[in-house]
Amino acid sequence: MSRFRDKFDHRVWNVVAAIPSGQVMGYGEVAKAAGFPRYSRMVSAALGRSPEPLPWFRVVRSNRTLAFDPGSDSYREQAQLLKQEGVRFDGVKIIEAETDNSLDRILWGPQE
């Protein structure tokens, strides 16, 4: 594995692992929080390489739609997992989810 990909993957995994239940982040937001703002298209591949289970379903498109084509098994799985966490949809778009996704808030929680 290249040094860059290893570093990128680990940072992405850390960010995604820190997304709280009931919240979502876009691929670009994850890449930016990981320190690689121009690499949003690589986030999905990094998630696929994770050796540990991650809450991958909390990562959505920037327009707040699910990451998969409607009607696919993956779409249904992502929707079901998000709904179990209280995320609401209007058709295919997320209409209610926490989205304050600053890196500090994701990694360390609300600041007093």
Image: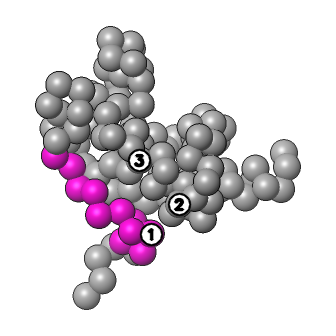
Indicate the position of residue 30 as horizontal and vertical percent values: 49, 54
Q: Quadrant of residue 14?
A: bottom right
Instruction: Please name which of the two marks, 1 or 3, marks the residue nearer to the observer.
Output: 3
- Give whichever of 42, 104 is nearer the camera: 42
Name which residue type carries label 1: Leu
Q: Do the residues labelled 1 and 3 touch (CB within 8 Å)?
A: no
Q: Are marks 1 and 2 in contact (CB under 8 Å)?
A: yes
Mark 1 and mark 3: Cα distance apart in space: 13 Å
Q: What range is drawn magenta here?
A: 96-107
Circle 3 residue: 26
Q: Residue at x 38, y 50 (%)?
A: 25
Q: Quadrant of residue 46?
A: top right
Identify the element where label 3 is drawn. strand
Hey, which residue is sitting farthest bottom in the picture?
A: 112
- Tag of residue 32: 2
Please give the label number shown on residue 103: 1
